[in-house]
Image (tube, grey):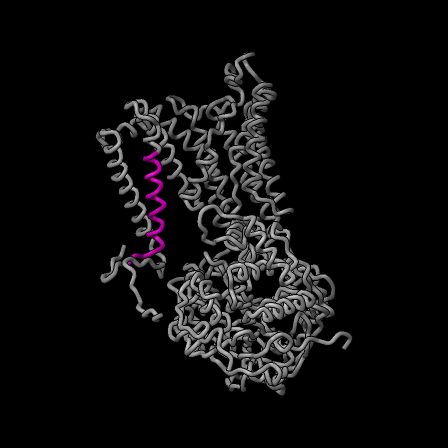
Amino acid sequence: MAKAAHTTREPVILMSKRGELLPPWKSWGIRVIGFLLSLVVSGIVIMMVSGLNPAAVFATMLDGAVGTTKRSWVTVRDAMTLLCIAVGLAPAFKMRFWNIGAEGQILVGAIASAACMIYLKNLPTLLLIPVMICASLIAGGIWGFFPGLFKARWNTNETLFTLMMNYIAIQLTSFFVALWENPFGSNSVGVINSQNKQGWLPNLLQEGYNKDFGWNVIIVLTVTLIMYLYMNHSKHGYEISVIGDSENTARYAGIRVNRAYVRTIVFSGAICGLAGFVAVSGASHTISTSTAGGRGFTAIIVAWLAQFNSVVMIVFSFLLVFLQKGAQAIASTYNLSQEVSEMITGIILFFLLGSEFFVNYTVHFRGKKVAK
Amino acid sequence: MASCAIKMENVTKRFGKVVANDHINLELREGEILSLLGENGSGKTTLMNQLSGIYYPDEGQIYVHDKPVTISSPKDAFDNGIGMIHQHFKLVDVFTATENIVLGLDGEGKFDLKAAGEKIRTICEKYGFDIRPEQKIYDMSVSQKQTVEIVKVLFRGADILILDEPTAVLTPQETDKLFDIMRAMKKDGKSLIIITHKLHEVLDVSDRVAVLRKGEYIGDVMTKDANQQSLTDMMVGHSVTLNIDRPMPKDPKPRLELKNLTVYDELGVKRLDDVSFTVMGGEILGVAGVAGSGQKELLESIAGLYPVRSGEIVFHNPQSGKSENLVGKDPLDIKRAGVGMAFVPEDRLGMGLVGSMGMTGNMLLRSYRKGTGLFVDRKQPEKLANSIWKDLEVVTPSTAFPVRRMSGGNVQKVLVGREIAQEPAVLMSAYAVRGLDINTSYTIYNLLTAEKMKGVAVIYVGEDLDVLLELCDRLVVLCGGQVSGVVDARTITKEEVGLLMTQHRKEGA
């Protein structure tokens, strides 16, 4: 048996980590190129599967999301709710605490808000709204507390735990929907306090459709800003980053990891609970098992895409809501199934995530060097 | 002369610039137990991995049963009847012994798990293994898991077995049992290689000993002609002069007193056994011992990171003159008690640093609690990062560049620089120069010596005996979690330390 000859084979494509950080304009440039490429590819896919003119399809999407003032404000409203959830998830995920339980945390926050609206409707608005905010924060916080405590004490798997808490929250919501059923037999709560609007976020601006949603924007953007400062400049935020990178390093530095887990997941749950308040008091004015509507999961995508930077999340929550609205418009206008638009969403997300690769790696081709 | 089960001729393996195996000629005779002896990093495991198909030699030729072979994958190794039992078990916890053993086997048609179970039972009965084929791995003790690994290679028809430090995880009783099994396999005509650095085990179980040192083959000796002293001499070699500057300590005073320290790990294995010694301010205390003798547990216990079962760690505060027991305190308590504790851990990125952050973020790790406000002050750490960048000549594009992406030497400079900047009273370092080039190593030695001259109590856990003997003032030698000697590093010889490293303290002595 002859011994195999040793030859070093040069790979056709060589990927290596960049030796330095890219300046922001370059890394964002790569991401923008990725986004544009995704539009081109989804255009081609649309043409191939439906034979429609991609430009017309994109125009329909645009029209569906921001075509009229009303549509624009609905897009803003939904983006704000999504943003609030994503902002709430950020500290947990940054700490590598897989909080899959935002759905549940939103629902219990929503239940708390609705309960205040129903039982405390005689309080003056100026008092009722803060009470609702506090109640939703506490409810969401409690929903986060249990998985956090169990993880800290017994090292249970938080993914399963938070996920199962969602089902409890859904059942709880069903129970309260049955309790508060109005009118009787409708199997829904209906619009709460529709006459005197107690517990509704008041009009911020005088006229136009935006009057109902102004406060949503202010509340959520304030939370976003606070979270940004908390994550990037506070001592707690620093501890979260350290734990997310290495628990051992955190212990070494004297961080009490278990306490930080519980503290952070309570905070995370509380903000998600607040999103429940925003959804009930600032948008639907009712509650049902679909109040969260999968947004607790969509928000995970927003948080990761933005790499837990709450300010960047504004962009991505708008993008995702925009795509959703656009998708609905395509579905109704062209009689296409909603899956087509989900394909587009998928393609765009794929390219956005893919561009992160080129931010961190360089690619050389055999023979010549190509800087990408 | 008996024919050879394995013969390696001029086998060389390089990792980048490092030569892990330098033209090694090794033979395993048919039906013998060969011990492969050497210090950490001497290339034992690398050499064996080339037999088991994990690495492919850069140069050289391997013969199995006197036939030249090419082993480029673990499958090739099995085809040649070579089976390796790795130090870290490669088992699926939720599977049974049988399922693990047949995992990865090719078979025609439907797999007959029952027949496999029967075959395993036969093997177990033949050698007296105490596992049941249908037992799940998570239900097994460490020694049983190891048995499954052994059965796995026997099941596949291996007649040459390589065991990589099999006794590291076993109790003495389990070790004896393993050795009985090894002898039974030998009687059955199998040839075995055992990697170990415990001399008494070498003398106990093997027929012949081959010694590696720093990637080179030193020689072999029949076990009956060897004793602990002669093997130690072969293993550690002659002293090399390094010319590390070593001033005499000025006015050493006790800084840290360890009294009867005993710790157990999560599995209930005793890791430190009644350890007592004193660390002086103004000296470098070296800790010598083969890997896994309790060095990690010792430092982590002092740092408040490892649960202490019994004993005391008393800190004498040089400023206040007060004494304080550190046992039962976590790192934050220790810091709040005013104990200046600096620690350069073995796992630099996994424990000492935050890999995803830059130098500034890592400086913050020790200082972010400063100030009463909610917010972190980044100005001071930024300044510190800049001064370390300049003073220690760290190669990095900026203070924001993630330390994970720096080279090993630069990572260590960042870590050591930060720890020294705390102006500690105690400075502990574990394998501070592992993987560093000569220049960086000397930078580290000089920094440690400078700290010693400032009156800091420096603890240096090292693996290179030449360095320990030239850098340190005193040495504590650990063996199997016990202190086997506290000696003057200026007068003791390398051979004497080597012997202490492998000599368990006698009961009652």
Q: Is residue B161 left or right of residue B23?
A: right
Q: Residue furthest top?
A: A184
Q: Position of residue A69 (x, y in %)?
A: 33, 24
Considering depth in this image, is A334 or B283 the residue closer to the camera? A334
Which image quadrant is residue B76 in? bottom left
Quarter placement of the C terminus of chain A: bottom left
Magenta-highlighted residues: A343-364
Which image quadrant is residue B238 in? bottom right
Q: Tell whether position A354 is magenta.
A: yes
- Residue at (38% x, 32% y) in the render: A321
Q: Is residue B309 left or right of residue B178?
A: right
Q: Position of residue A280 (x, y in %)?
A: 50, 25
Q: Position of residue B253 (x, y in %)?
A: 68, 77
The overriding secondary structure of the stretch rendered in magenta is helix
Q: Residue furthest right?
A: B508
In the rendered view, would you say B328 is above or below A51? Answer: below
In the rendered view, would you say B360 is above or below B66? Answer: above
Which image quadrant is residue A159 in? top right
Considering depth in this image, is B212 or A11 the residue closer to the camera? B212
